[in-house]
């Protein structure tokens, strides 16, 4: 529905000065039950549009899950406003949103089909839709099996089917790839792209940077409950002042120098190449003019800009190493390769 109901660039959800802080117990001598406001999110301004996938990233405790719950209308705002296109009531807002928490415990007697059909009944949705969603997420062959036999990956798939129930225009996913095998991860990424191409707005939070770089069109970077960067990755890199990097390789005599203000770093060779470098600019960007000035006498086999990537962006914006921030660089697909 690229040009239909949703509209590719249509505004779907807006947050203005959104603030929510969790009450934290602060016992006092004569008030042992006293609380005060603790961590959460503060002053969030965010606009979500249809037809895109937004990657939500930040260190542990940055407020990502809280922000998703606020957008899903599950946590009340302390201050600010939340508006969902075409929805004037809380119930209408929730109907427009599909929310998948980080971990759902599917317990008790019953099968996956029974669980999804109960949700269909609660939401006044045809039972056939629930069965189609089980097939979509790859649970059709296990739909009659008891939930107690399900692995974590199967429970994740069931949670995704529940989030998709009713065809929500906005899909909020908190660590959805946890527990999925590589084949399921690939199918999941394809599904999300198809939903976005049809005009849905998809927001996905993940600690696995490789997955987000594959998926997201834009990124929101959070730290200490606030948004510290928002936009396409290349724009965020530029705004943070990260060094522009050019990957070059070629044939013939190895270059000795590339000029002032350029740091050269040797990188692995590809077959048939005689030299290869990453060139880091101390200032500025690798414009076309600057690339042509490298040396007309050189025979290049590679000459291309290298994005800094989420790892560098997060470290630059927060001052934290990736490991300290609680991220994984490689996806399960990469680590199993």
Image (tube, rainbow, N blue to C red):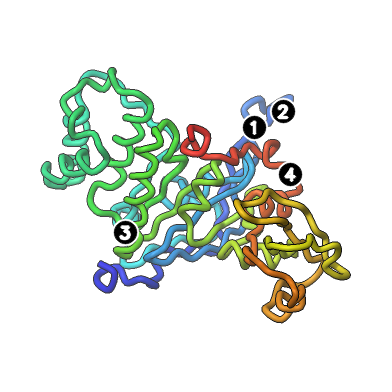
Task: Give the CA distance from mark 2 to mark 4.
Answer: 35 Å
Which residue is at 43% across, 58% downward?
53
Say few, some or many: other residues with alpha carbon within 10 Å of mark 2 (under 14 / 14 to 19 / 20 or more): few
Q: Residue furthest right?
A: 260
Q: Is there any visible trace of residue 292 in the rendered image?
A: yes
Q: Which mark is residue 169?
A: 3
For disc 4, the neighbor class at 10 Å (few under 14, some 14 to 19, many from 20) is some
Q: Which residue is nearer to you in this view: 174 or 189?
A: 189
CA gap, disc 3 and disc 1:
41 Å
Mark 4 residue element: loop
* Dot 2 and dot 1 residues touching (CB under 8 Å): yes
User: Which residue is at the front of the view, 19 or 60?
Assistant: 60
Check the image and report above or below for 128 versus 47. Answer: above
Where residue 70 appears, x then y in whole percent? 47, 50
User: Residue at (42%, 39%) from the top-left corner?
Assistant: 101
Tell whether 36 sits left or right of 118.
right
Give coordinates of residue 62: x percent, y percent.
62, 45
Mark 2 vs mark 1: which is more N-terminal?
A: 2
Please say if the residues under marks 3 and 1 sit with CB atoms less than 8 Å apart: no
- What is the C-alpha distance between the residues marked 2 and 1? 7 Å
Q: Mark 4 — residue? A: 320
Residue indicated by mark 1:
34
Residue under the image location 28 percent in, 18 percent down? 149
Label 3 packing within 10 angstroms: few (<14), some (14-19), many (20+): many
Q: Which residue is depicted at the point 23% across and 34% down?
A: 139
């Amino acid at each position: 529905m690229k040009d239909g109901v949703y509209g590719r660039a249509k505004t779907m959800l807006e947050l203005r000065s959104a603030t929510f802080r969790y009450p934290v117990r602060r016992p006092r001598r004569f008030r042992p039950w006293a609380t005060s406001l603790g961590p959460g999110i503060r002053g969030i301004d965010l606009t979500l549009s249809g037809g895109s996938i937004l990657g939500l990233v930040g260190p542990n405790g940055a407020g990502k899950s809280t922000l998703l719950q606020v957008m899903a209308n599950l946590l009340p705002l302390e201050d600010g406003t939340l508006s969902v296109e075409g929805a004037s009531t809380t119930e209408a807002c929730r109907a427009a949103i599909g929310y998948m928490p980080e971990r759902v415990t599917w317990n008790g007697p019953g099968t996956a089909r029974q669980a999804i059909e109960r949700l269909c009944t609660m939401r006044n949705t045809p039972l056939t839709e629930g069965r189609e969603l089980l097939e979509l997420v790859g649970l059709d062959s296990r739909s009659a099996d008891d939930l107690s036999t399900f692995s974590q990956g199967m429970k994740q798939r069931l949670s995704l089917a529940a989030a998709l129930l009713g065809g929500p225009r906005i899909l909020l996913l908190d660590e959805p790839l946890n527990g999925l095998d590589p084949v399921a991860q690939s199918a999941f990424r394809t599904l999300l792209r198809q939903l976005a191409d049809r005009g849905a707005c998809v927001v996905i939070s993940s600690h696995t940077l490789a997955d987000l770089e594959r998926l997201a069109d834009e990124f929101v970077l959070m730290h200490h409950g606030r948004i510290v960067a928002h936009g396409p990755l290349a724009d965020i890199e530029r705004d943070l002042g990260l060094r522009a990097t050019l990957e070059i390789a070629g044939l013939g005599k190895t270059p000795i120098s590339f000029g002032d203000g350029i740091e050269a770093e040797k990188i692995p060779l590809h077959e048939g190449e005689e030299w290869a470098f990453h060139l880091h600019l101390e200032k500025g960007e690798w414009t076309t003019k600057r690339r042509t000035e490298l040396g007309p006498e050189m025979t290049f086999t590679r000459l291309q800009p290298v994005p800094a990537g989420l790892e560098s962006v997060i470290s630059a914006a927060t001052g934290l190493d990736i490991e300290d921030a609680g991220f994984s660089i490689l996806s399960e697909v990469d680590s199993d390769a």
